[in-house]
Amino acid sequence: MLEYSSDQLDIIKEVSNIALGNSATSLSELLNARISMSVPNINIESIGDFISSINETEVIGKILILKGQIEGSILILFDIDTAKKIVSNIGQGKLLSQDKLDDIKVSFIEEVCNIVGSTYIRNIADYLNIKIEIENSSLLYDELTAILSYTLMEEEQFYSEVINIQTDFKYEFNSEFMNVYFYFVPRKGNIDKIFN
């Protein structure tokens, strides 16, 4: 992990706790199920160290490109089993007629990512009293390491750090956890805008 003070990490933790809490509320409304969230754990890591520590797992999700007073990317990724469980809870399982993600289910997961990510960013912007615009990108469906290598290493001249936001989303009715990967990748120099 890169050298940041505990006060600096606490700032990101506090902002993320508020923002992700509201994301969980938005997700609850979309899924028509109570979703709780654990207090996030924050690590700020170099891109190289971060990618080398990632385990292989198949994921689906999106990158949201940030423009404005803070620039960078937000990655919201679900492992495949979690994605299937999410769509199976819609329409009493009618969307999950087969054990695969078809176009309808993929579109729904894309919408979940948009809602969670945009709610998070909107709350960050409100908390810091700044303007951030979101540009959508295409859906990602691959091994986690492949996605991160492609999206981060290709742009390493623009990015140097990853804010790894570790939290648990959980269905309250059965205490089942969602495996969600949430990464904030600010462009070089942008992380200082949060602290300032």
Image (cartoon, rainbow, N blue to C red):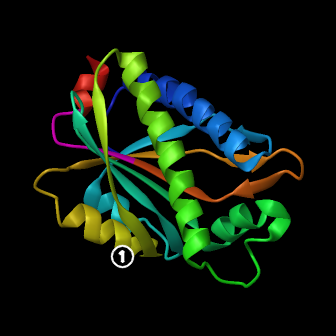
Q: Is 80 rendered above or below residue 64?
A: below
Does residue 84 appear to the left or right of 46 in the view shown?
Answer: right
Q: Nearer the viewer, residue 53 or 36?
A: 36
Percent coordinates x, y for residue 33 in the rendering: 80, 45
**Pointer 1 local density, CA inside 10 Å: few below 14, some 14–19, many at least 20:** some
Q: At x 30% / y 21%, what residue is drawn?
A: 195
Q: Is residue 28 magenta?
A: no
Q: Relative to residue 179, is residue 69 depicted above or below? A: above
**Is 98 located above or below residue 119 in the figure?**
below
Give, as a single range, the part of the protein colored magenta: 184-190
Q: Is residue 110 left or right of residue 192?
A: right
The reply, left or right, for residue 95 in relation to residue 7 is: right
Q: Which residue is mark 1?
A: 146
Q: Which residue is drawn at the image coordinates 30% and 24% (left, top)?
A: 194
Give the quarter of the image for residue 51. bottom left
Q: Position of residue 46 (x, y in %)?
A: 28, 52
Q: Position of residue 149 (x, y in %)?
A: 29, 70
Q: Is residue 189 magenta?
A: yes
Query: How far from the left and from the top, in percent, is residue 123?
Result: 46, 26
Point 36% across, 76% down: residue:
146
Say what secondary structure mark 1 lies in.
helix
Query: What type is the residue that disc 1 sits on?
Result: Ala
Q: Residue furthest right?
A: 173
Q: Please tell me which residue lies in front, 103 or 7.
A: 103
The answer to which image quadrant residue 49 occupies is bottom left
Q: Quadrant of the C terminus?
A: top left
Relative depth, front residue between 57 and 47: 57
Q: Is residue 141 among the parts visible in the rendering?
A: yes
